[in-house]
Image (cartoon, helix red, strand yellow):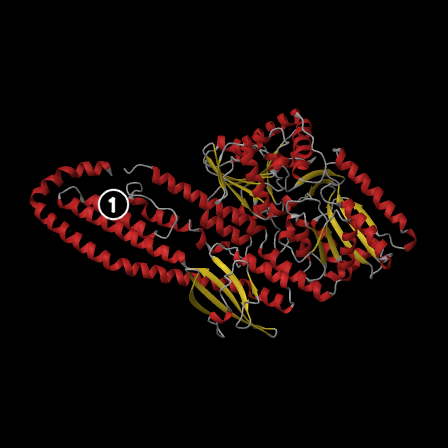
Amino acid sequence: MKSLKLAMRPAFFQMWRSQTVQLAKYGLFASIAAFLATAALAPLGSALIQDWSRRDVELRSTLVFNAVGMHLTGLLAANQRVQIDQLFERVASDARVVGVALCRGDGLPEYASKLMPSTLTCKGIARSEAESFSTLTVAGRRMLVGAFPISAREIAAHFIILHDLSYAEARGTEIRNYASALLVGIMFLSASLAVGLASYLARQWLKSFRAAVANAADTSIMATPGQIPGPFDSEIRKLLKKLDVSRNATDGEHVQWSKQALRNILNTDLPGVDVLVVANREPYIHNNGPSGIELQIPASGLVSALEPVMRACGGTWIAHGSGSADRQTVDANDRIDVPPVNPEYVLRRLWISEDEQDGYYYGLANEGLWPLCHIAFTRPIFREADWQTYKQVNERFADAVLDEAKSPSPIVLIQDYHFALLPQMIRARLPEATIITFWHIPWPNAETFGIFPWKEEVIQGLLGSSILGFHTQFHCNNFIESVDRFVESRIDREHATVCHRGNETSVRPYPISIEWPPEALASQDSVAACRKQVRNRLAVSDDTKLIVGIERFDYTKGVLDRMRAVDQLLIAHPEWKGRFVLLQAAAPSRSKLPAYSGLQEEAIRLADEINARYSDCGTAPIKLVIRHHEPAEVFELFRAADACVVSSLHDGMNLVAKEFVAARDDERGVLLLSSFAGASRELSEAIIINPYDAFAMGEALHQALTMPAPEQRERMRLMRARVSSRNVYRWAGQMLLDAARLRQKHRILRMASEPSQ
């Protein structure tokens, strides 16, 4: 464009003398017209913006009521006061929601969130038989009050939601400011034209730029004159609109998250993106068996969550090849297409020697980081040699990512504590990559993490991520506190970002979940058939109550604690002797480590001891099955059980709880869930237990065994609705949407930083 300007300069000066008078008149008239037009339209624009903002708030109020109305009606019918208060506080946590309440008469609201103004009475709120909206001034601020009638199950009330409208006035002020700025710009341009300092090309460029800014005026990222070339006009408008997070409806609870929805995100927001997953565990393992090569799907919550995501996204999964026949099944580049029947993505296997496995996986990761992050009172072990091996293996995975990347800016999803150093290593190799690291286990408080000898290196490694995810906000807070204590950085707590060595990392909670509906559920028999088949295998009567516990042998899962709870149940309630069985299915795990092999031996000893104590009662109360169970077997046990117990001593999320809920399409069965598992934040309708209190857990088992069918159905229905809406596709979709916005923002900033040509 600069060369075009230079080329036009001689012609411009030839025209200058003959057109000076005309340009001066044009400039004067244009300035006057622009001044009058802007002065007249500024108030109108401000009013239109305020009116649009009000309608936007009304729509938000209606969406909130549609989301919670049915749930609230059920809670009111059951007189669940605590749950109603909790529901109201969750709704009121939105930044623009001042408060929510429930009115039945003209006095004070019957229920109200904590920040609901005390001066606001039901009598002062306009209500009718249909939804209604009114504007009030409360404590000097303009508020929009939405009133929604509830008339079901003999309930007559109004759901009240109060929104702050002060931001609408602020928007109007912004419009007036923009109009004033536009006026100054037009006057300056007219004056420039009058003295011959503007050219036709410059006028076209400014016109295009002003149109782009005007169309994107409601976005959070604005360009400045001279930064963005005209040819990028349409591209800028598109990208700026996508960056408005508050208008992106795909974050809502009402979205039907599925494999196709995830693919739509990739096609729309990340077209042609290169997706790479890095995880220690592979989704498909090939082992040599008696009849040849056998395929195994590992018992892993990580695999259960990520595998359906990869089938939706495609791309490449990079993992340690651990099977005895893994080398026989890959191609010359150590790759294999998976799933075997209908391949949808590529598995790249990396080979790790036994010595490397001992240092990196068994040593630093599982004898060091695992017990450090899980507060299960097992002392972590730190060895310098393990740390060196851990670094070496992380370097090898970084090289593998570089090999598999098809572009300089892929999306790399790094999974778990095995790769704390990997984000920074990839950042050094692929500076334009969008790196999402998800930490699947808890993150301890800063004081606890402070005992880790290489804490600074681990934190700095993770801060190579673009986005760092945890299961809960509590774990995010712990990580930020650790950064604040041990690493020099700039922390923005309001936006949960950390700037370190020129890289900004967003720290976000992404509660992981499961596929909905689970693939293993499709091949299941009816609940009645499953109950009969499982009880026949266990050689127990049809009327025997069955509670299942399903996980791998790990000291964080509370396997011994639930056995002790069974003993307490039979002591306090002897009527269950011979009429109750705990089926504990546990897959061997990390048997090379003394803490794990010792746990398995102790579990066998404790089960034998308790069973011997009740040997004269017929059916043994504990049946311990130590082997790997395929997903179909697990879901059969879930469907056959009267209850499922998840007694984790400390857990990031725990997907067993969600799988049990997903398996019960009959809306029966009871979930007993540890308060120390992340899933307890979402599945509050479960019986919440403290696994450290054996007596109380025994009483919880009794409550589960005697819970009436209607109560089971009500609890299960609510949990199933939550798991179905917050499934694994939503987990992945939120991360990918955040990655898309981040990439778009960086793209705009790069364009804005380029000098105009």
Q: Looking at the image, which is closer to me, 186 or 637?
A: 186
The amino acid sitting under disc 1 is Trp
Q: Residue at x 29, y 61 (%)?
A: 44
Q: Is residue 254 above or below residue 231?
A: below
Which quarter of the figure is the C terminus placed in? top left
Residue 748 in the image: x percent, y percent? 38, 42
- What is the x, y in percent for residue 120? 49, 65
Near-viewer residue (541 or 556): 556
In the displayed structure, 173 sits above or below 200; it is below
- The answer to whether residue 370 is above or below residue 157 is above
Residue at the extreme right of the image, as rendered? 616
Regarding residue 131, the answer to whether it shows in the image is no
How far from the left and from the top, in percent, is residue 679? Answer: 64, 50
Query: What residue lies at 36% left-to-right and 60% top-to-bottom?
Result: 50
Which residue was labeled with disc 1?
A: 205
Residue, far left = 18
* Up-down relation of residue 34 to residue 386 (above or below): below
Q: Is residue 634 left or right of residue 397?
A: right
| Left or right side of 376 for 142 | left
Q: Is residue 508 visible?
A: yes
Badge 1 element: helix
In the displayed structure image, the side of residue 433 where residue 204 appears, left or right: left
